[in-house]
């Protein structure tokens, strides 16, 4: 068994002041679906709609098409930009297994839908995980979500119906497509955040059993990775 706890040099939730009381757009993607090792990490990136054209010119791309150094450089750019926010949701192997092996099992797709709905609610609430009813001024500082771009899991229309049921019909306009991470720069940004976060978490792999001293040269943790394949075969 392994331990993965969100302990990074960056926050799980980052909500820039420039995203308050303005129209914002959101992109959602994940990294680590179907790996041999490591967590499934979801990320939602967002920024003001008025700055979309300028931010898109920064050069974000699908993280799978980028080399590690390129991803790290773009992630540094994301972290330093005053108008780019994000929410990260880590689904550990232990959590996924527990949910899928319950008496009434929950599918991986359903787990994913719930994680995305949770992230979107956090953004809607101005970076707060649980809705707190405060002053009118607090309510006026919340963002207005216009468009949500998502790289689909399963059928896009069914995905949309699940999110609409969880968040309400007036939450925003959902654009859910295959390969959205290569089509929309804001989804590309989310893809980069998710991938860099997952890779960093994987590097901090720890076993709960102190007697286990397995080699950590397991590459990316994906079954298609030759390094991971060799590691798995010799254990």
Image: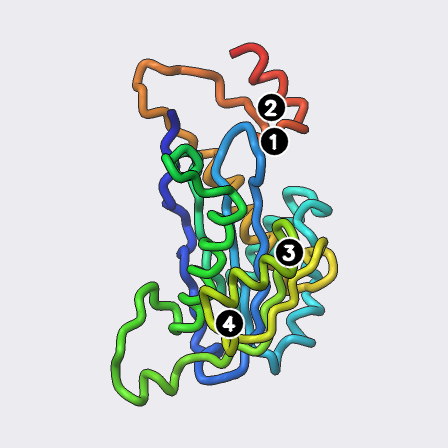
- Quick check: 59 left or right of 80? right
Mark linked to residue 82: 4
Give me the residue at 44% from left, 36% from top.
100
Pointer 1 residue = 222
Q: Nearer the viewer, residue 107 or 225?
A: 107
Q: Classify mark 1: residues with Cα within 10 Å, few (<14), some (14-19) or many (20+).
A: some
Q: Classify mark 2: residues with Cα within 10 Å, few (<14), some (14-19) or many (20+).
A: many
* Image location (x, y in percent) of residue 23: 54, 82
For marks 3 and 2 on the same chain, the one whose residue lies earlier in the sequence: 3
Estimate the spatial distance between the alpha carbons at disc 2 and disc 4, rounded to whole Å: 37 Å
Pointer 3 residue = 151
Q: What element carries label 1?
A: loop
Above or below for 165 versus 221 = below
Inspect this view and state whether residue 34 appears.
yes
Q: Which residue lies furthest to the front in this view?
A: 104
Q: Nearer the viewer, mark 3 or mark 1?
A: 3
Estimate the spatial distance between the alpha carbons at disc 3 and disc 2, rounded to whole Å: 26 Å
* Image location (x, y in percent) of residue 161: 56, 63
Asked if the residue at tag 2 contacts the one at tag 1, i.e. Cβ–Cβ closer than 8 Å, the answer is yes
* Image location (x, y in percent) of residue 107: 50, 42
């Amino acid at each position: 068994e392994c331990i993965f706890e969100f302990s990074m040099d960056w926050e799980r939730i980052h909500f820039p002041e420039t995203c308050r009381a303005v129209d914002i757009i959101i992109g959602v993607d994940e990294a680590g679906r179907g790996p041999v090792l490591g967590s499934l990490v979801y990320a939602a990136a967002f920024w003001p709609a008025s700055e979309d054209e300028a931010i898109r010119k920064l050069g974000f791309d699908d993280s799978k098409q980028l080399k590690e150094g390129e991803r790290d450089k773009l992630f540094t750019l994301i972290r330093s930009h005053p108008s780019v926010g994000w929410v990260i949701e880590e689904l550990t192997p232990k959590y996924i297994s527990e949910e899928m092996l319950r008496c009434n099992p929950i599918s991986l797709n359903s787990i994913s839908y719930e994680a995305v709905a949770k992230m979107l609610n956090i953004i809607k609430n101005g970076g707060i995980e649980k809705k707190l009813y405060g002053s009118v001024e607090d309510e006026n500082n919340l963002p207005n979500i216009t468009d949500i771009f998502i790289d689909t899991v399963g059928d896009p229309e069914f995905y949309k119906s699940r999110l609409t049921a969880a968040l309400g019909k007036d939450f925003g306009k959902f654009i859910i497509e295959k390969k959205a991470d290569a089509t929309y720069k804001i989804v590309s940004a989310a893809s980069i955040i998710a991938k860099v976060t997952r890779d960093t978490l994987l590097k901090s792999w720890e076993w709960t059993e102190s007697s286990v001293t397995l080699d950590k040269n397991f590459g990316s943790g994906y079954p298609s990775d030759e390094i991971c394949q060799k590691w798995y075969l010799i254990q």
